[in-house]
Image (tube, rainbow, N blue to C red):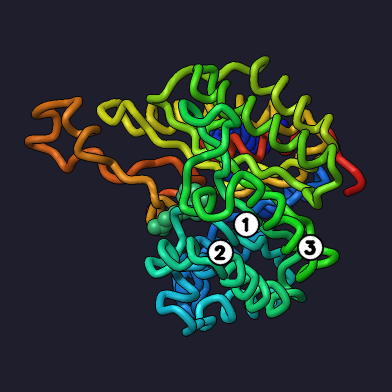
Amino acid sequence: MGATSALSRRTVIASLAASAVTGAPAPGRPPATLSSAAARSGRWFGSAVRSEHLAAGHPLRPLLLRECSSFTPEIALKWDALEARQGVLDFTAMDELAGIALDSGVRLHGHTLLWHRSLPAWAGVALGRRDGWGLVDRYFASVMPRYGAAIRSWDVVNEPCDAGGRADGLRETPLLAAFGPGYVERALRLARQYAPRAALAINEYGLDLDIAEDEERRAALLRLVSDLRGRDVPLDVVGIQAHLDLGRGPFSESVFDRFLRDLAATGVAIEITELDVKEFDYIASQDERDRQVAALVLRYLSVALRHRAVRGVTTWGISDAASWLEVTDADRARYPGAWQDGPGPGLNRGLPFDAAMRPKPIHAAILRAFDTAGVRAGR
Ligand code: XIL
C-alpha cells in the first residue's frame, strides 16, 4: 500500500470519527439531512417557521427547505395573529407560508386553532357572551377551508391540560370559563365539519420528565384522550411538544416509554411537535453545553422512535439565530460575575443549527435517533 492511500485512509478514518461527533459528512458524500433520515424511518422531520424566514435571500430559507419535510407556522396561524382586530382577518403571512409549502412539497401542520395564549385581546370578554361559540365557529370556518389544500393536520386545542388545578385535569382558561369542560369535544367536532379528511390533534406540553408535575399532566391527558376516543369524538393525533429543559428534572426512559405505550393504546397517532432544549449550565464550555443538549435529545428520541405510533418529529425552530428560548436574567444570576470580562453565555443552544447555520451535536443526535429507529409503515 503506497503512502498516498495510507494517508487517504487515515483521512477517511479521521473524518468518520469527526462525523460521529459533529454530524459533519464524510468527504464526497452529500450531507445527511434530517428530512432524509426521517424519511428512511418512514417519518417526517419538521421545524416551526415564520414566513419571513422563508423569504428569498433569508439565510434560514435554504436550511429550512433542505432539512425539513414539514413546517409548522410559529405565529402566522394563531388567532391573535390572524384577527388582532375583531372582524378584520389578515391572512397575508399565512397565505405566503401555505404557498411556499405547496410549491416545495412540504407538509404543513395547522398550529393552532384554540390556545388560551393566542386568543385575541378582544376575545376574552366576547367569548363569554351568549353567542361566544359563534365566534369560534366563524374563526374555524374562515381558516380551515381556506388552507384545506395545504394543511392536512390541525392542532385543534393546544395545552388543554394542567397539573395542580382542577380534579378533571383541564386547564383553567377563558375557553373553559366560557364553554365549560365540554369545549374540547365541541371544538374537535366543529373542526371535523370544516376539515372532513384532516387529522385532528390535541397538543400538550410538560409530559416529558420524571417529576410529579409531568406525571400529573400525563395522567390528565391520558384520561382526556381515552374519554374522547371512547366516545368516538374525532381525535386522531396527540402532539407532544417536548420543550425539554435541562434544569427542570430528570428524564426517565421507562416512564416516558410507558406513557407513549398507554397513549398509543388509545388508538391515536403521536407526533413530537415542538422539540427544543432549554439549557441550564451556561457556564460550561460550548462543547460541554452542546454535549448535554445532544445527549438528552438522543435519549428522548430513542424512546419516542421505538413507537410506530410516533410519525414525525418537529423542532421549534431550526437555528439558534431564531430561537424562542432565551438566556434569562435568572440564568445569569446563577453565575454572579461569571461573564464580567467575557462575551457572556451567548444564545441558548437548544436547536439543531447554531447561529452561523452550522450543525451541532444535537443535529447528529436527531440523525442517529432516526437512523437507529425501526422503519414505520402505514398511517
Ligand atoms: C411561541 C412562539 O415561539 C413565540 O414566538 C410566541 O411569542 C409565543 O408562542 N408552545 C406552543 C407554541 O404551542 O405555539 C409556542 O410558540 C411555544 C410554546
- Residue 342, given in percent of the width and then of the height, sits at 13, 38
Image side of residue 267 versus residue 204, left or right: right
Q: Amino acid at mark 1?
A: Glu
Disc 3 residue crowd, few under 14, some 14–19, many 20+, Cα 10 Å: some
CA gap, disc 3 and disc 1: 31 Å
Q: Amino acid at mark 3?
A: Arg
- Residue at 44% x, 40% y: name it: 350
- Residue at 46% x, 53% y: name it: 174
| Image: 371 above or below 43 | above
- Residue 300, given in percent of the width and then of the height, sits at 61, 28
- Give the residue pinned by disc 2: 73
Residue placed most toward the observer, 328 or 335: 328
Disc 1 residue crowd, few under 14, some 14–19, many 20+, Cα 10 Å: some
SS class, disc 3? helix
| Front: mark 3 or 1 | 3
Q: Amino acid at mark 2?
A: Pro
* The image quarter in which residue 58 lies: bottom left
| Total labels drawn | 3
- Give the residue pinned by disc 1: 67
Residue placed most toward the observer, 204 or 166: 166
- Mark nearer the N terminus (3 vs 1): 1
- Residue 199, given in percent of the width and then of the height, sits at 78, 56
SS class, disc 1? helix
- Residue at 69% x, 36% y: name it: 224
| Front: mark 3 or 2 | 3
Image side of residue 59 versus residue 326, left or right: right
- Residue 147, given in percent of the width and then of the height, sits at 69, 75
SS class, disc 2? strand
